[in-house]
Amino acid sequence: MKLALTVRYGYDEELIFAQQLGADAVVVRFDLGDPQDTALSPVAHRVQIAGLQLAGVELTGMPDTFQPWSDGLTGALVAAGSAGVDRLFCASPTRQSTDLAEDLEAVMATAAETGVNVCLDSSRLLAEELAWLPAGDVHVELAMGSAPLLAGADLPAQGADRIRAGGISGVRFDGNGQPLGIGPLDVPACIAALAAAGYDGLIRAGAAPLLGEDDDWNPKGAANDLGYLRAVLQSLPQRS
Amino acid sequence: MRIGLQTSESEENIAFVRSLGVTDVVCGMPADIDGVVPAQAFEQRRDHFAEHGLDWGVIENLSPTLYDEIMFGTPERERQLEGVCRTIENIGKAGIAVLQYQWMLLGGLRTEYSPTGRGGARYPKFDEAIASHMAAACLDWMGGGRHRYPHVPDRPLSSEEVWANLEWFLKAVVPVAESAGVRLAAHPDDAPVPEYLGVARILISIDNLQRVIDTVPSPNNGIGFCMGTIGTMADTDVIDAIRRIGGQGKVFFAHFRNPRGTVPAFEEVFPDEGDIDMVAAVSAWNDVSFDGVIRIDHCPGVVGDNPRADRSFAFQVGYLRGLVQSLERMGA
């Protein structure tokens, strides 16, 4: 598996931080609502020139109603395709309809045209939507620890089932405000189950917890979570 | 094992430790009064930590200025010994279980702190060839330059003399520690080179740490097992060393650190990239049923970090907890 750290676009310190702490790749958070995040085109170059791999761009600041969201995403897909970005992570909007196939038609078509993978956050999907995906190049990032994949005894099995079903382009471990390893989420068991199910893709931690006093991007929490995940990954061969 | 962090009494530092879910803390000694640290000083500090839900179970270290004359074997050692013994009794009164000390007459040695690590991280380094040109400048690593310890030696000291001084110390203080209920943990010499500025360094091998244990056999005489220092000893396998010393129940305290290289030249790197197989190391700690505190040791400098290096320490806490939980839960 490849371990990624989520960084904000334009903050070079966070790229250096990711490299120093041994992240295999970065997911760059790009805020569509931020006037400084104007174009996707430099993202891949900046990451590459900094000596890192780009695992994808996470779009934030997207509209919360479906049609503007879909329009924004298709536009971002076109931009990503020409910018050398091959995966977009995003959360789906709050929706009334569950007819996902019809709603996502335009997104799926654009993803196919551009060759860019869309990775929807499972924590924002209805259970039936999660069961229906993947659809073409629209995949899922499994948010382990957040609804509907809440921490519990069967979470590793749920994750493994989803891996076997296919279409998982990322797995995220959400500590929900606590450092990984402190809360109820059994990350080692989950990662072991994912590995046993054949998953070899991207993993990352969710929002970094605030540890004491910290800068606004919670680097102490990010460091803890990255170190934790690295250790769990390194211990995997010992278990086989 | 219990994951520990070194901390001061500051609210900010304590808040950081607590937020990481760490409850075992390691702290230095309060100030002495005429060579003795009063019991009340230990108790006040202990209570301060306890009010925040923290357990202060290890003192790191016995302040070298309380026993530097003993290490050097000067006529002043008798006076210092009395103070050390009274201080150990006071530690026992405060209920603090472990007192780590070291026997480095010239302190710890490093020659560089340079941005040559992963992504430009700053790695503390030691290179004997460079140290030979630095002379006394090497001695400032532990920040002791403002004090009388460590200082440029007055004369050479052989390993026989340094061993004799340590044996004199152990024979006097181990019985006191037994009575006080305090376990003494000897930290190895860092860097583990046989001499510096003409002064021998003796705790530079596993056999020599064993000699400390055997000099005064006692349940209160043991080792502060610094993985980083032992990992830089020549021809030493850290995993074997954990099993040898830990298997005797003689590790009272441990440091979690991963170096790259051994003497004469090494560097301190992130725990996931050093020479020690940390998965095997934690497995070995489990095998010997180590139930003491393992403290996250000093670590590389990370971009934007504060003077306490919280970012770097947080990474290492997460890393160690990840190893511990993986091995515990998956039965490896």
Image: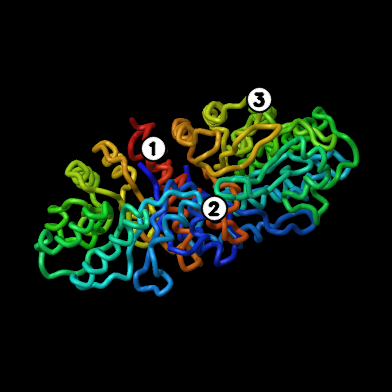
Q: Chain of mark 3?
A: B
Mark 2 nearby-residue class (10 Å; few <14, some 14–19, many ≥20): many
Which numbered dot is residue B134?
A: none
Asked whether residue B144 appears in the rendered view, the answer is: yes
Q: Secondary structure at mark 1?
A: helix
**What scheme was used to colour the molecule?**
rainbow
Task: Give the spatial CA distance, label 2 vs label 3.
Answer: 32 Å
Asked whether residue B82 appears in the rendered view, the answer is: no
Q: Secondary structure at mark 3?
A: helix
| Residue B95 versus residue A207 in the image, above or below | above
Foreground: disc 3 or disc 1 = 1
Mark 1 nearby-residue class (10 Å; few <14, some 14–19, many ≥20): many
| Residue B282 versus residue B51 in the image, above or below | above
Q: Chain of mark 2?
A: B
In the picture of the structure, the residue carrying the numbered disc 3 is: B207
In the picture of the structure, the residue carrying the numbered disc 1 is: B327
Residue at position x 64%, y 40% in the image: B267
Q: x, y percentage for residue A3?
A: 39, 47
